[in-house]
């Protein structure tokens, strides 16, 4: 009887703890940064800082719960990116990197800082993870770019796409980006795909580029 009661107590304690962390996630990340003013965003920072501090204060207690919440469905979309960044700051384990990548897929990229996103995808790609599903969403945003003040240089959509994919295996993304080009209507997105394929210098990519150069239906800006 004592063993049964002890087991039930531990189970109840774990469930209560899990619910507490889950509730805090919903209370902390119940917003979409893209829909807030800068002043409103700044008011949310102390709450996020407190959440990060809590998890990092005792990873033996909170780390598995963070992983579980990132894997689960139904949490605020912004949490899936920010929570992934939190996990990345704690662990460089390949299994955790996979959790982080899958969590990013569930986030709304409109809420995410572009430089942070591209840098994170590049880092995950260097671990040979398949970043294609997220990276290709960069093409959905016609204005996707960010400024590098230290170089006085804009990292345009094509460079962002390339930086997010190039470190990983071309087998992951070549078919996907070529298929996207064939169905793409936006000229800038087409040029971004050409930029990526040029940098890959792959047999499949080069063959496709040669075909575009010879195709009179291809826009001049693309062939140029």
Image (spheres, rainbow, N blue to C red):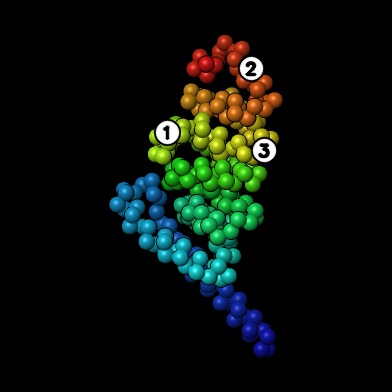
Disc 1 crowd rating (10 Å Cα; few below 14, some 14-19, many 20+) is few
Instruction: Please tell me which of labels 2 and 3 falls first in the chain.
Output: 3
Q: Residue at x 67, y 27 (%)?
A: 202
Residue at image mark 2 = 210
Q: Residue furthest front?
A: 150
Q: Can residue 183 be spotted in the picture?
A: no
152 and 35: which is toward the camera: 152
Assess whether mark 3 and mark 2 are in contact (beta carbons under 8 angstroms): no
Q: Secondary structure at mark 3?
A: loop
Q: Secondary structure at mark 1?
A: strand
Residue 135's spot in the image, x, y percent?
A: 55, 39
Residue 103's spot in the image, x, y percent?
A: 55, 51
Distance from disc 2 to disc 1, alpha carbons, whole Å, reads: 30 Å
Instruction: Please tell me which of labels 1 and 3 falls first in the chain.
Output: 1
Q: Residue at x 51, y 36 (%)?
A: 160
Residue at image mark 1 = 153
Q: Residue furthest bottom?
A: 2
Q: Is residue 198 above or below residue 124?
A: above
Image check: 68 left or right of 28? right
Residue 214's spot in the image, x, y percent?
A: 61, 12
Q: Is residue 26 above or below residue 203?
A: below
Instruction: Please tell me which of labels 2 and 1 falls first in the chain.
Output: 1
Q: Is residue 144 above or below residue 47?
A: above
Q: Is residue 12 above or below residue 92?
A: below
Assess whether mark 3 and mark 1 are in contact (beta carbons under 8 angstroms): no
Residue at image mark 3 = 169
155 and 213: which is toward the camera: 155
Q: Residue at x 57, y 77 (%)?
A: 12
């Amino acid at each position: 009887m004592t063993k049964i009661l002890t087991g039930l107590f531990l189970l109840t304690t774990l469930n209560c703890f899990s619910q507490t962390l889950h509730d805090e996630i919903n209370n902390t990340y119940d917003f979409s940064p893209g829909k807030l003013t800068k002043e409103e965003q700044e008011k949310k920072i102390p709450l996020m800082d407190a959440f990060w501090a809590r998890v990092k204060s005792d990873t033996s207690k909170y780390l598995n719960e963070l992983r579980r919440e990132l894997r689960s469905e139904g949490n605020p979309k912004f949490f899936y990116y920010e929570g992934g960044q939190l996990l990345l700051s704690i662990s460089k384990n390949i299994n955790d990197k996979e959790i982080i990548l899958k969590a990013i897929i569930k986030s709304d990229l409109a809420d995410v800082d572009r430089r942070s996103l591209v840098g994170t995808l590049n880092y995950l790609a260097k671990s040979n993870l398949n970043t294609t599903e997220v990276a290709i969403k960069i093409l959905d945003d016609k204005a996707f770019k960010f400024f590098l003040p230290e170089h006085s240089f804009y990292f345009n959509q094509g460079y962002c796409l390339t930086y997010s994919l190039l470190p990983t295996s071309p087998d992951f993304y070549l078919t996907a980006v070529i298929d996207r080009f064939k169905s793409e209507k936006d000229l800038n997105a087409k040029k971004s795909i050409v930029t990526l394929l040029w940098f890959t210098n792959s047999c499949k990519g080069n063959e496709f580029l040669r075909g575009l150069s010879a195709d009179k239906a291809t826009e001049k800006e693309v062939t140029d």
